[in-house]
Image: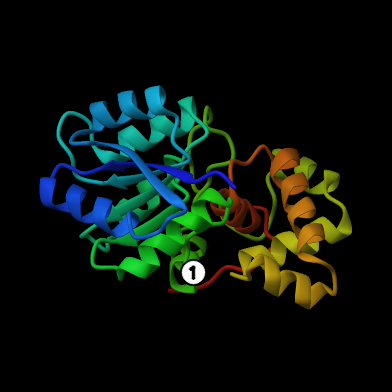
């Protein structure tokens, strides 16, 4: 198998070099380059076409949210946001911009490595706590060109209902379990099917709903009323 290609983006030289050292301990990972500001990050991503981008939030020239939006729109890279700030506004802005994960910079090295592997495999990097924060907020992000207006859970909007009508009963089951925080293996065990079957269902769901990844699928499931509203 080819190695996972990574771009590291952070305005602090020490952080960039530390991440390079951490990622370099895994023979399956390859750091293609680094960027010290948002605009440089976008340019490097377009040129190098990495599989995964580790992105800082607060950077000069263009912040991490803006850079993430441009990278996810112009490449197939998965963006994992790294920040020292555990704040909901950063979390939601990053997800709305297309990020596939959100980690704090004090995360253990082995967790960062696992996160890169998970992102490259198309898996969301959301803990159950973060998932609940998304559900409580009711983020609406199905269409990048549409205004991102929060929609109450419980009743699907017409467009979402049309998408739901296109899903098979099994695809709906998989979507609900995904939104509940289950991994592919857990979904497979719960539904008594293989992981390969689960992956096929997830691919079909993302294609039918026009979603980029599992993070957006969680948001769609909430907005469409497939999972109940959660009070803070």
Q: Give the side of residue 41 with respect to residue 126, left or right.
A: left
Residue at image coords 53%, 72%: 230
Q: Position of residue 166 (x, y in %)?
A: 84, 44
Residue at image coords 31%, 67%: 109
Q: Position of residue 112 (x, y in %)?
A: 36, 62
**Mark 1 lies on residue:** 132
Residue at image coords 47%, 53%: 28
**Element assignment for label 1:** helix
What color scheme is it? rainbow
Q: Residue furthest right?
A: 169
Q: As displayed, is residue 88 above or below residue 211?
A: below
Q: Give the side of residue 132 with respect to residue 85, left or right.
A: right
Q: As displayed, is residue 68 above or below residue 91?
A: above
Query: For residue 105, which quarter of the picture?
Result: bottom left
Residue at image coords 67%, 59%: 225
Q: Nearer the viewer, residue 218 or 101?
A: 101
Total label count? 1
Q: How many residues crowd around disc 1 within 10 Å: few (fewer than 14), some, or many (20 or more)?
A: many
Q: Give the side of residue 111 with respect to residue 191, left or right.
A: left
Q: As displayed, is residue 83 above or below residue 166?
A: below
Q: Nearer the viewer, residue 211 or 230?
A: 211
Q: Position of residue 75 (x, y in %)?
A: 48, 29
User: Quarter holding the C terminus?
Assistant: bottom left
Q: Position of residue 38 (x, y in %)?
A: 24, 32
Q: Is residue 216 visible?
A: yes
Query: For residue 143, which quarter of the picture?
Result: top right
Q: Nearer the viewer, residue 108 or 1?
A: 1
Q: Nearer the viewer, residue 127 or 107?
A: 107
Q: Is residue 158 visible?
A: no
């Amino acid at each position: 198998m080819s190695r996972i290609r990574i771009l590291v983006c952070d305005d602090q030289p020490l952080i960039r070099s530390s991440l390079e050292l951490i990622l370099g301990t895994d023979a399956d990972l390859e750091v293609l380059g680094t960027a010290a500001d948002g605009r440089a990050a976008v340019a490097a991503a377009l040129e190098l076409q990495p599989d995964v981008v580790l992105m800082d939030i607060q950077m000069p020239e263009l912040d991490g949210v803006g850079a993430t939006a441009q990278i996810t729109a112009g490449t197939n890279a998965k963006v994992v946001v790294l920040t020292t700030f555990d704040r909901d506004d950063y979390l939601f802005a990053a997800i709305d911009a297309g990020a596939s994960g959100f980690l704090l910079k004090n995360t253990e090295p082995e967790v960062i490595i696992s996160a890169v592997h998970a992102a490259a495999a198309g898996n969301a990097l959301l803990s159950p706590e973060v998932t609940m924060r998304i559900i409580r907020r009711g983020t609406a992000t199905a269409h990048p060109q549409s205004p991102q207006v929060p929609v109450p859970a419980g009743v699907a909007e017409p467009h979402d209902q049309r998408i739901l009508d296109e899903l098979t009963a099994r695809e709906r089951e998989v979507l609900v379990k995904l939104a509940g925080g289950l991994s592919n293996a857990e979904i497979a065990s719960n539904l008594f099917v293989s992981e390969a079957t689960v992956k096929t269902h997830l691919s079909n769901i993302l294609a039918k709903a026009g979603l980029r990844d599992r993070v957006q699928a969680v948001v769609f499931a909430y907005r469409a009323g497939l999972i109940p509203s959660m009070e803070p």
